[in-house]
Amino acid sequence: MMEADHLAERHSLSEDIQALLIGSLFVALSVQLLRHAQLLTGGTAGLTFLGHYLSHIPFGYQFFALNLPFYVFAWRAMGRDFTLKTFAAVSLLSLYSEWLPQVFHLDRLHPAFAAIAAGLLAGTGLLMLVRHRGSLGGIGVLALYLQEKKGWRAGKLQMGADALILLGAFAALPVRQVLLSILGAAAMNLVIAVNHRPGRYIGMS
């Protein structure tokens, strides 16, 4: 670990900016696939999808608003730089989510493909953000805060929250779409689990 820290090369500002721009765009593309197929995912994005399907308030507006309370936990748990990058990523995703439907339209999309492709895109985008010390805020940040303050495992908290959100989806979506949503969430977590391992990537921000 000491050797990895010694070899680690810090990301430049331009590298951080491109990661925020591209990582958020990949997640926004996954949002478009999920929205077109009437699916959802876990985390704060999942809560936003539930609100969007039930109220028809635009996804981007709801996602930005839902994240506002979590910046307090981000600042306390992860510090200023992480919080600012998270705010930038959330803002970009909110903007992309409302802008992308104006520049491309899907005429045909199989729901199973939408679920898997959305999961892979979201996992790749989140991986880029995490490697540059950013996130998409929300429940994940709260889990990190509780891990630091209470000693609770952030991974287990996140999994529990995702499970509750996906269970709540049965009130808003048909069973088939909820099951496909679970498939997409599994694809996303697979990307992160395979690629986000200590020692494989030593870039720092």
Image: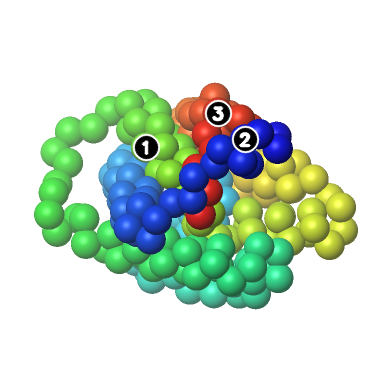
> Tag on residue 167?
none
> Which residue sits at x=13%, y=49%?
104
Where 68 falls versus 202 (above or below)? below
Q: Mark 1: which amino acid?
A: Leu
Quadrant placement of the N terminus: top right
Three-letter amino acid code at the position of disc 3? Arg
Contact between marks 2 and 1 (CB within 8 A): the answer is no
Q: What is the secondary structure assignment of the residue under circle 3? A: loop
Mark 3–mark 1 distance (CA, rounded to whole Å):
20 Å
> How far, Cα to Cα, is label 2 from label 1?
28 Å
> What percent of the width, then of the height, locates residue 121?
37, 37
| Disc ID at residue 4 | 2
Direction from residue 199 to residue 99 in the image, left or right: left
| Residue 83 image position (x, y, % from top left) | 55, 68
- Which corner quadrant of the image does residue 117 belong to? top left
Mark 1 lies on a secondary structure that is helix
Which residue in the protein does label 1 denote?
A: 121
Q: Position of residue 64 (x, y in %)?
A: 44, 70
